[in-house]
Amino acid sequence: MRAIELADVGRAYGERVALTGVTLSVEEGETLAVFGANGAGKTTLLRILATLLRPHHGTVSVLGSSLPREGWAVRGKIGFLGHDPLLYRDLTARENLRFHARLHGVGFERVESLLDAVGLRARADDPVHTFSRGMVQRTAVCRAVLHEPSLLLLDEPFAGLDPGAAAAVAPLLTGTRVVISHDVETKADLVLGLRGGRVAFCERSVDVADVRALYA
């Protein structure tokens, strides 16, 4: 089954074209890696897939639902990790995750399992505003995977994490994924390179030099 299908997708902000002509398909269980310099259109693409933005042209299908018309049917099946951790800073890590667990009908035992997995059990009852950047990121990852989504949309999931924290988080980020990354060594089934909102390449095998050239 195709988890994602895009055909000639584009989006503009006023007169500025942020994304244009994106066509690709991602099969269930595959990883799409998205590369490009700042302003290339990566975040715009991720937000369209997350139902947070409407495309201005083209067609989008996510998990069998046509977006934006059927966004309501797919939102609960998506795990989204953007630049904003989407956490309540005055709540503790445990309170944040329990809040999201209630929204998704998930038992609190899942919350405790995730806190253990990312090494936050000892700080679980501290307010998020007291956390380091890496601890906030670990909590945000837990929020994104809490309901075991069918599709993960990840914007730099390892940002702010030291090697130990990254190793703890990595096993949680499985299944069908779209990953925005600046790490040219990121492994993926399909690699999309964006430059100025346009597709530079979209291939299943891409030379690392071609990825690096996006940032030149």
Image: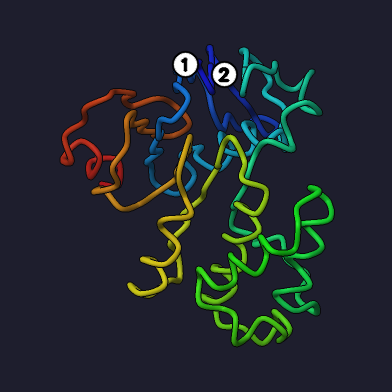
Q: Which residue is mark 1?
A: 23
Q: Is 82 displayed left or right of 51 in the figure? A: left
Callout 1 secondary element: strand
Q: Position of residue 172 (x, y in %)?
A: 48, 55
Relative to 210, does residue 157 appear above or below in the rendering? below
Crowding around mark 2 (Cα neighbors within 10 Å: few <14, some 14 to 19, many 20+) is many
Q: Which mark is residue 9?
A: 2
Q: How many marks?
A: 2
Relative to 144, does residue 161 appear above or below in the rendering? below
Q: Is 116 displayed left or right of 25 in the figure? A: right
Q: Is 186 displayed left or right of 128 in the figure? A: left
Within the image, what quadrant is residue 160 found in?
bottom left
Q: Residue, x 67% and y 87% (percent of image)?
A: 130
Q: Position of residue 165 (x, y in %)?
A: 42, 72
Question: Identity of the amino acid at label 1?
Answer: Thr
Q: Nearer the viewer, residue 41 or 1?
A: 1
Question: Identity of the amino acid at label 2?
Answer: Val
